[in-house]
Every structure is written in structure tokens, then in C-alpha cells.
Amino acid sequence: MNSNGLIVELWMDNEAEEAARFYVNIFENAELGEINYYNAETPSNKPIGSIITVDFSIAGQRFQTLNGGPFFKVNPSISFIVNFDPKNDVNAGDSRSKLDQLWGKLSEGGKVLMPLGKYPFSKWYGWIQDKYGVSWQLILTNPEGEARPVIVPSLLFAGDNNGKAEEASNFYISVFKDSARGTLTRYPAGMEPDKEGNIMFTDFKILNTWVAAMDSGRQHDFNFTEGVSFVVECEDQAEVDYYWEKLSAVPEAEACGWCKDKYGVSWQIVPKQINELIYQEDKEKGKRAMEALLDMKKIDITALITATEK
């Protein structure tokens, strides 16, 4: 799998493997990756030896499902745009057909958030929440528009966050390396409850990953939670320290490399060798690394390595 870019982690109760295999089976260009197992007692009370995470990718976007217990749920505050671009298909109509087929598979046991149909911004679009609670925006894109990846995570700024999409996207662009602004479209007058000037849609590139954001003045019963988090893999302790200082804004949410920013979005700031330390072949060393991790807020790489050498 491509080691660049953000990793998206999806919090599950006990469906990590089932969900990952489901996505790999229904999406094109999808690949199953590593499966890791619990090797120490954790707050989730999952049995030692049971699955903790499953890695997979869809069209180059890396995902990870986590069996974390019933503490958090995935919700539509962070969804995933799936771009079907006609210029990438040899035969006219293939994109529409492929979109319809994927919609049908995601609909099984799911919930329609916006019906599949024609909208001012797309000739064919729909928003669906699948049986695992993960939300997907399937869109037939304009072939004359700027190229974007197949999968684009999308942040919905609603409730107390409504009106903050521009500020938040500027903040992320300032924090992350290799960042750039893409499209930015504002709400015009007359689209109440959405306020004129708020962000109808914007996208931006951070760490080689395109992310979208939009404001919504409509009533929603969800907001950002740990149900969906973004994993930032760091080269060294200096990078861990940098991203932790920039992103962590909610002290009570700090645990095991997890933090929340000032908008409520969850991040995992981890060293690239985290899996090598925790899930190594020497089970006892891996267990000691896991136990050390459970006592940390911001990750201390040296302390993790030291724990394995006791």
C-alpha cells in the first residue's frame, strides 16, 4: 500500500474484519492489508488474540477499521466522496452504471441521506449511509473539472461548527506539509437556512490527501466524534511533537496518541514504526509496547522502544 497521505480510521464495535472485507469486495481497485490482534488488556475489554485493526485501501486511499468497542459510532459528519469521472471510462455511460451498481451494494441495510438523482452540482449524485454507519457521497463528476482522487474525505461543519469550514480549512492548510487550496464555493443569498458567504464546498490538499469541507445550517443530530479519525504517520519525535502541539485542543480527549482539534475532529499522531513495535513477532515485547502506549497521551517513541527492551 502507498505509505503517503492520511490514513482514515473507522471505529467499529466488533465488525472491523467484516466491514473491511465488505468494502474491498464492492469497490474497484481495493486491497486488503494487514490484520493486527490485541496483545494486552485494554479499556475495550476485547479478548487478547482477537482482531484490533484491519488495513485496506480503496483507489489508493488508506483506511483502517478498529474493533474499539461500543464507545463511539461513525456518523455522517465525516463522509467519503466517491468520484465517478466519465473521462476515465472508455465507454460512454460506464461511470453512471458503475455509480448505480455501487449505490445498490451500499444501500443494502443502509440509510439514504440524499436520494440518488440529478442536482444543480451534478447530473447524478446520492448520499448513502451504509450498514456499518459509514457515509458515502457518490457523484458523477464534471469531466471538464479539475482532476481529483476517487475517494475524498469530506467534513461537514454543522451545529456549533456551522460557518467554520473556511477557518478550519485555512487552519489545516497552515498546519500540514504539502498543502494547497483547491475549489472554494460560497452560498449565495436566498439559500436559507444556509447563510450567504458560508462555504457551500471547498477542498484542500494536506499530506498528499485531498479533503473536502462544507458548512450546513440545517438541523443535524450529529457532529465530529472519534468514530472517524485521521492518522498522521510521523518520521520522528520532532514530527510527533509538532503535530500534537498544533492539533491537540481538548486535553480530556488525549490518550494513546489520539487528540481532538478545536473543531472536534479526531487525530492520531503516531510514529511510522508504531505497528512494528506493538505487533512484532516477539509477543512479549509487543505486549510491553502496548502497555506502555496505554499509559501515554502524546506518544514518546523512546519510551516505547525502551519498553520492548526490558
Image (spheres, helix red, strand yellow):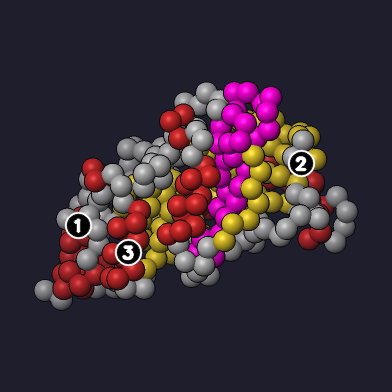
Position of residue 233 measured from the top left corner of the image (x, y, whole percent) = 39, 65
Q: Nearer the viewer, mark 2 or mark 1?
A: 2
Please tell me how many numbered marks the rendered image carries. Answer: 3
Q: Earlier in the sequence, mark 2 or mark 1?
A: 2
User: What's the residue type where badge 1 is placed?
Assistant: Met
Residue bounds of the magenta highlight = 187-216
User: Residue placed at 20% from the left, 57% from the top?
Assistant: 296
On residue 296, which mark appears? 1
Residue bearing the label numbered 2: 122
Taking the image as drawn, is residue 23 in sight? no
Say whether marks 2 and 3 touch (CB < 8 Å): no
Q: Earlier in the sequence, mark 3 or mark 1?
A: 3
- How packed is label 2: few (under 14 Cα within 10 Å), some, or many (20 or more)? few
User: Residue placed at 58% from the left, 48% from the top?
Assistant: 212
Taking the image as drawn, is residue 247 in sight? yes
Q: Nearer the viewer, mark 3 or mark 1?
A: 3
Residue bearing the label numbered 3: 242
User: Residue placed at 11% from the left, 74% from the top?
Assistant: 310
Q: SS of the residue at dot 1?
A: loop
Q: SS of the residue at dot 3?
A: helix
**Residue 209 located within the stretch drawn in magenta:** yes
In-front residue for pair 148/161:
161
- How packed is label 1: few (under 14 Cα within 10 Å), some, or many (20 or more)? some
Position of residue 95 measured from the top left corner of the image (x, y, whole percent) = 79, 51
Position of residue 28 measured from the top left corner of the image (x, y, whole percent) = 67, 57
**Residue 73 located within the stretch drawn in magenta:** no
Q: Farthest residue toward the left? A: 310
User: What's the residue type where badge 2 is placed?
Assistant: Ser
User: What's the residue type where badge 3 is placed?
Assistant: Tyr
